[in-house]
Image (cartoon, rainbow, N blue to C red):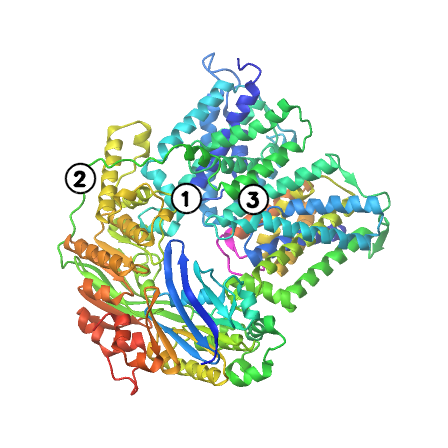
């Protein structure tokens, strides 16, 4: 039982890491970026390829992956969102154009890596097992959890306490007012996508490290859970997404314990459905629900 | 008279097919104050939107110190010391008062007024510096909007309807602050519906009617001109 | 000749049907992404009902499955819609996706569905039957476009607020499109099952949903044949690729993705806009008959609206406080006041867009607080401060939406080509053309609002409001942005309308125009009525002058 709860926390931290990049973009720019799953998948493949080719150590790998992810995020915003700004159907068109961008990205992944799953090099990461208070955890799990928490706290700090974060919150609340005080809204927008996609690629690489391999469907498998996390947490709320990620992981663990692992898939969506109907601002969210 | 610090030449602004401003020209000397008055919908706010960079004018030129800044984005104009106090205040309600002010200082950090000095000028903001700006009263929000512009030590301040929706006592306070700004040699362009009040404070006035300047002159003369009242109420 | 292509052609038909289930919600501006769930429910249910032997010895058993699928899908959509349609935009999208996933997990775990193994049935679906269904759907959507229901869909898509004010029941229209979407998805699910002979819960997953959405958007949802174009095009890509001998599996998704990106960025109306460009836009001509059967307006002087102590506050802000007002038939009532005085809030309450927080009132027999379409049905029409025209409809179609409160639904009768439907459409058309002529826009009937000058847009909005044959016409700043000449023409039009017995309530900043036009003037400041009565007396009231110009002092003697 306790073991399962611990596993729930681990998978929950990945959900949360996936979702904060997702919710960051929505919270600040009101874009629902459906290419985020493809960015996530890209991160997994990039991590594997760079690790295989260069053999650079794990701690150096993630910043490289994040850097490439950030660039991809900026390109994504330029192509799939910026040209739509000011159009009547901006929000709907953004959904479609980001789906399309994600599709292109996945096709390119297929072109480069083929359809077979790819794995990290053998023993790229020390495969150590710990026993803590009767719980068995792997080093990978511990590192993932620690990194996920550190990244999330780092993002929260960045948004709440730095000039860039202040400018981001200004844009989130009122882009016109932000321009009036001299915020370069285009740059903040690009920065938001860079952060979001950087986090997304790191999340992808971490998940791939945990399961040892990846395929093209990695992002799609977590995308729908990501929706559940951001709605449960309150669309646009960072703290909400973190908490909701962990809650979902735990809820899945409990379902497996009391029912059957096949029912686990129902949990996020049943929760999501209930929250949307009963409390659309999310369990933890404070922001007003915006109609997009 | 000295060279104008700000000049607007044959400015036209359109929303889609609607021409809100047609061929408007005026200039302000350094340290001077111009009032743009006129009824609602006369195009006053659109002039300021184009001057501050929130909108691209269809035609015309905006110059700051003789430099053509017509194509500059808004944030670059703020950096050069041309700052707008927007209509409806546009304070950031979820950010604290202090954060709103910090944003205002952000583009011109080198010149920025130290927060302490600013709070002396706006004591009401000092007490509320850690509150979300949305919790302030309408008058306090207007003060914050002005303070947020002043913290960057601007050279030209554009004010759009600073008295709108305020109770008469608050209107007095706002105009008191405008007098102080004038005394510190900052150039001011004031857009107001409260024409009498605005013209009493300004050197020069321009009356806008349906997007174009209908009358111009020394503010004290416009104040006595019955045509101004006519522009507002249509009564003779 | 087509032998050997049966599978391909049937696949196209299935893709068209799936796309139609998105088309019908996109037409009404709703982002339903639960189609996979509806299709799955319908397909699994049909296995319980559909016979395993041909009907009467020769008919395909799918003929039983199709109506069952439509019924199951439609009923499920109705039940899901009851809670979910309170949501909009991305929230609606995510909520419906969640429903689809719940169905998938449920089917995986249920006993009778044999879980992830799936079910097998005989392949009863033939290519002919698939295309017959496509033809029927195409017919249904072809007849829907220029019907009253079709216009209601378009109006809700373009602007819900304006649609409600034109008398369209927004809640009902959204639900109708949602149920139709579920029914078509249900039909798709059943046909899919009996074509491939096998389904698993994973058949109906999120990628199926995305595929359908992409097809519908690519084809274009503004014209009825959009899904056919989209499905044909998307199916053609891999075929062309095969014909060219390009093997790589990633080319197809790459091209699809790039194509979709190009369409959404450069052809917002989908591929069908290319086809539409080839044909010059046709406007249905004026039938030249007088619109008949319109109820007479009440006698001038009859009270038609009464407000008592009306107030509205937003948080701590009192936008309107204790306003008492009576409106009588045939009068022209002007409302003026400085910015932020509460004028728009007042008319929003009168027309049902906002609920009063204090006081009460009745307009044309409808109590304040009712939804806006009830006021429209009772004879109130309005325009908006920032024009809320339906951007993707022609000027004529905009005005046709306006006839909603005084016309009857024609869709079902149009399906049967009944002469009465034709009569009703001609009557609506005559009514619409009459209003276009009245405001002087008859020669611009074919243009979209975006192609009209600003003054013309404002007049078009008035024509749309007049098409409802209103007793009370509410105009929110109709002359804003007009030049003197246009404002003068508008004043003349308002006087004409008053002559015809229509009561006009209008907010305006052009005070000269108000004084020239209205028979009574009300001045608001800080949400309160500060003066009311004979226009010129009111305008000379020192309180009013002060509200507008600021307090006078010793420096200025005039006024």
* Residue C91 pos. (x, y %): 52, 50
Left or right: C538, with B88 as reference point: left
Residue C522 position (above or below residue A259): below
Subunit ID for the residue under disc 2:
C
Q: Which residue is mark 2?
A: C290
* Residue B211 pos. (x, y %): 35, 64
- Of the pair C113 and A67, the residue shown nearer to us: A67
Query: What's the distance in space between the residues labelled 3 and 2, CA to CA?
Result: 48 Å
Residue C142 position (above or below residue A182): above
Q: Quadrant of residue C320?
A: bottom left
Quadrant location, the C terminus of chain C: bottom left
N-terminal of the pair, mark 1 or mark 2, is 1
Q: Which mark is residue C353?
A: none
* Residue A195 pos. (x, y %): 66, 56
CB-based contact (under 8 Å), mark 3 and mark 2: no
Q: Please provide the residue range marked out in magenta.
A: A277-292
CB-based contact (under 8 Å), mark 1 and mark 3: no
Q: Which residue is mark 1?
A: C174
Residue C277 position (above or below residue C475): above
Q: Residues within 10 Å of mark 1 (few under 14, many from 20)?
A: many
């Amino acid at each position: 039982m306790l073991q399962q709860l611990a596993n729930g926390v681990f998978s929950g931290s990945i959900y949360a890491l996936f979702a904060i990049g997702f919710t960051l973009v929505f919270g600040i720019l009101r874009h629902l970026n459906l290419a985020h799953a493809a960015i996530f998948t890209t991160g997994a493949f990039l991590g594997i390829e760079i690790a295989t080719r260069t053999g650079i150590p794990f701690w150096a790998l993630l910043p490289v992956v994040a850097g490439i992810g950030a660039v991809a995020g900026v390109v994504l915003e330029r192509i799939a969102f910026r040209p739509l700004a000011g159009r009547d159907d901006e929000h709907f068109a953004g959904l479609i154009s980001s789906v399309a961008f994600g599709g292109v990205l996945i096709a390119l992944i297929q072109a480069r890596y083929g359809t077979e799953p790819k794995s990290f090099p053998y023993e790229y990461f020390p495969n150590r097992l710990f026993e803590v208070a009767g719980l068995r955890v792997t080093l990978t799990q511990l590192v993932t959890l620690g990194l996920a928490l550190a990244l999330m706290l780092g993002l929260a700090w960045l948004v709440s306490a730095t000039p860039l974060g202040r400018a981001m919150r200004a844009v989130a609340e009122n882009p016109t007012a932000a321009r009036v005080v001299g915020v370069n809204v285009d740059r903040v927008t690009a920065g938001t996508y860079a952060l979001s996609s950087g986090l997304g690629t790191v999340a992808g690489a971490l998940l791939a490290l945990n399961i040892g391999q990846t395929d093209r469907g990695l992002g799609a498998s977590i995308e729908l859970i990501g929706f559940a996390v951001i709605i449960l947490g309150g669309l646009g709320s960072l703290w909400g997404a973190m908490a909701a990620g962990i809650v979902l992981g735990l809820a899945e663990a409990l379902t497996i314990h009391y029912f059957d692992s096949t029912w686990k898939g129902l949990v996020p969506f049943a929760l999501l459905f209930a929250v949307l109907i009963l409390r659309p601002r999310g369990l933890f969210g404070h922001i007003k629900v915006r109609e997009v | 008279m000295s060279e104008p610090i700000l000049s607007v030449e044959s400015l036209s602004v359109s929303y889609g097919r609607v021409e809100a401003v047609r061929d408007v020209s005026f200039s302000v000397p350094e340290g001077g104050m111009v009032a743009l008055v006129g009824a609602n919908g006369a195009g006053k706010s659109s002039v300021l939107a184009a001057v501050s960079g929130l909108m691209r004018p269809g035609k015309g030129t905006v110059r700051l110190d003789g430099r053509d800044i017509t194509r500059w984005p808004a944030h670059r104009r703020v950096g050069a010391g041309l700052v707008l106090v927007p209509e409806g205040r546009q304070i950031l309600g979820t950010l604290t008062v202090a954060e709103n002010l910090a944003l205002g200082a952000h583009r011109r950090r080198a010149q920025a007024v130290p927060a302490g000095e600013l709070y002396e000028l706006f004591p009401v903001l000092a007490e509320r510096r850690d509150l979300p700006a949305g919790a302030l009263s309408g008058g306090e929000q207007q003060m914050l909007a002005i303070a947020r512009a002043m913290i960057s030590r601007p050279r030209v301040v554009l004010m759009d309807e600073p008295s709108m929706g305020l109770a008469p006592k608050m209107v007095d306070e706002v105009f008191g602050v405008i007098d102080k700004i004038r005394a510190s040699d900052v150039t001011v362009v004031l857009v107001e519906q409260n024409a009498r009040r605005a013209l009493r404070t300004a050197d020069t006035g321009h009356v806008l009617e349906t997007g174009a300047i209908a009358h111009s002159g020394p503010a004290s003369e416009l104040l006595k001109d019955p045509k101004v009242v006519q522009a507002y109420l249509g009564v003779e | 000749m087509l032998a050997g292509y049966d599978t391909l052609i049937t696949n196209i038909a299935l893709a068209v049907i799936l796309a139609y289930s998105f088309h019908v919600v996109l037409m009404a501006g709703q982002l339903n992404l639960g189609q996979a769930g509806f299709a799955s429910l319908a397909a699994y249910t049909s296995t319980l009902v559909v016979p395993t032997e041909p009907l009467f010895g020769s008919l395909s058993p799918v003929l039983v499955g199709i109506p069952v699928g439509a019924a199951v899908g439609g009923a499920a959509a109705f039940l899901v819609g009851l809670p979910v349609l309170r949501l909009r935009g991305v929230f609606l999208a995510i909520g419906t996706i969640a429903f689809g996933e719940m169905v998938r997990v449920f089917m995986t775990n249920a006993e009778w569905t044999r879980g992830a193994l799936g079910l097998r049935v005989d392949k009863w679906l033939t290519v002919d039957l698939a295309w017959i269904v496509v033809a029927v759907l195409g017919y249904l959507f072809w007849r829907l476009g220029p019907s009253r229901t079709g216009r209601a869909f378009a109006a809700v898509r373009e602007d819900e607020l304006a649609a409600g004010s034109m008398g369209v029941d927004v809640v009902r229209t959204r639900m109708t499109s949602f149920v139709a979407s579920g029914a078509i998805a249900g039909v798709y699910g059943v046909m899919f099952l009996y074509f491939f002979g096998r389904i698993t819960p994973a058949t109906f997953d999120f990628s199926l949903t995305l595929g359908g959405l992409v097809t519908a958007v690519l084809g274009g949802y503004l014209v009825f044949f959009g899904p056919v174009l989209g499905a044909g095009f998307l199916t053609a890509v891999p075929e062309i690729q095969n014909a060219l001998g390009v093997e790589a599996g990633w080319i197809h998704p790459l091209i699809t993705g790039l194509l979709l990106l190009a369409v959404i960025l450069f052809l917002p109306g989908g591929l069908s806009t290319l086809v539409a460009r080839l044909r010059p836009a046709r406007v249905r001509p004026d039938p030249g008959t007088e619109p008949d059967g319109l109820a007479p307006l009440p006698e001038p002087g009859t009270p038609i609206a009464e407000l008592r102590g009306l107030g509205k506050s937003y948080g701590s802000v009192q936008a309107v406080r204790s306003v008492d007002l009576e409106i009588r038939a045939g009068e022209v009532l002007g409302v003026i006041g400085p910015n932020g005085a509460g004028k728009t809030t007042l008319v929003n309450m009168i027309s049902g867009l906002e609920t009063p927080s204090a006081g009460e009132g009745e307009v044309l027999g409808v109590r304040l607080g009712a939804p806006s379409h009830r006021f429209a049905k009772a004879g109130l029409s309005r325009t908006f401060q920032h024009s809320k025209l339906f951007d993707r409809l022609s000027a004529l179609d905009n005005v046709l939406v306006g006839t909603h409160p005084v016309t009857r639904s024609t869709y079902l009768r149009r399906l049967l080509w009944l002469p009465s439907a034709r009569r009703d459409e001609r009557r609506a058309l005559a009514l619409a053309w009459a209003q276009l002529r009245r405001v002087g826009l008859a020669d611009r009937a074919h243009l979209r609002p975006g192609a009209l000058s600003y003054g013309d847009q404002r007049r078009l909005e008035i024509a749309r409001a007049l098409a409802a044959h209103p007793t009370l016409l509410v105009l929110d700043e109709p002359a804003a942005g007009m030049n003197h000449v246009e404002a003068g023409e508008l004043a003349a039009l308002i006087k004409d309308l008053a002559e015809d017995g229509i009561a006009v309530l209008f907010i305006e900043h052009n005070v000269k125009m108000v004084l020239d036009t209205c028979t009574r003037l009300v001045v608001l400041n800080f949400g309160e009525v500060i003066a009311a009565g004979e226009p010129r007396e009111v305008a000379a009231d020192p309180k009013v002058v002060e509200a507008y110009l600021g307090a006078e002092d010793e420096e200025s003697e005039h006024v």
